[in-house]
Image (spheres, rainbow, N blue to C red):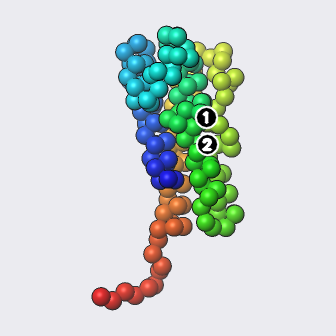
Amino acid sequence: TVGRLIERLMGVTLRLQTFLDTRALASAAGIDVLLELFDSTITFRASYQRREDLLALVDLLVLDSANPRAFGGVLRRLRTELRKLPGSPEAIEGMLMLLPSEGAGLTLEELRDKSDAQIGARLLELAQQLRGAMAELSERISASYFTLAQGVEQRV
């Protein structure tokens, strides 16, 4: 489960970064495609009634901890699953410290009076931070749970 959540977060951060880099969110078609990729079209339309601004997208696709495809939703689940792993409390806490302490590491208040360009820059920064954290988390999990014992000689 942890591996699946790491992959999901890496995927959604890369998708959002690609859409921001290519300025695809400047068009209604780009927004529709992104919502489709996040499997959130119906939820977005029901909540925002065709209001297609960047802040509304951030609210649903990044911050919403109830949305299983949003950064916040994946991170909430990931924190829960990491706490279930066997190991020392210190090791688990070290893994949890790689993640934002709560939410997605960003708040709507931080972005409220910012321009779309400033919001986009902050989202790119967040996406890069989260992808780096997921790479490090993956390495730690691999080293802790999937590394064969060193020095063990096996004969067939």
Q: State the residue at coordinates (62%, 17%).
A: 114
From this view, report whether residue 14 is shown above or below residue 85. Answer: above
Query: Element at badge 2?
Result: helix
Please state which amino acid type lies under the numbered disc 1. Ser
- Percent position of residue 81, x then y: 59, 53
For the question of whether residue 125 can be seen, the reply is no
Q: Is residue 40 above or below residue 154?
A: above
**Disc number at residue 20?**
none
The residue under label 2 is: 76
Confirm or deny contact between disc 2 and disc 1 (CB under 8 A): yes
Q: Mark 1 highlights which residue?
A: 65
Quadrant in the picture for the C terminus: bottom left
Lateral position of residue 128 relative to residue 100, left or right: left
Horizontal and vertical percent position of residue 144: 54, 67
10 Å crowding of disc 1: few (<14), some (14-19), many (20+): many
Quarter where residue 86 is shown = bottom right
Whether residue 106 is visible, yes or no, is yes
| Amino acid type of the residue tagged 2 in the rendering | Arg
Residue at point 40%, 87% (across, down): 153
Residue at image point 51% right, 20% down: 44
Q: Compared with residue 85, is residue 152 higher up or lower down, i.e. above or below?
A: below
- 144 displayed left or right of 24: right
Give me the C-alpha separation between circle 2 and circle 1. 6 Å
Give 120 or 85, whichever is nearer the viewer.
85
Q: Position of residue 94 (x, y in %)?
A: 65, 58
Seen in the picture, residue 63 relative to 149 is either above or below; the reply is above
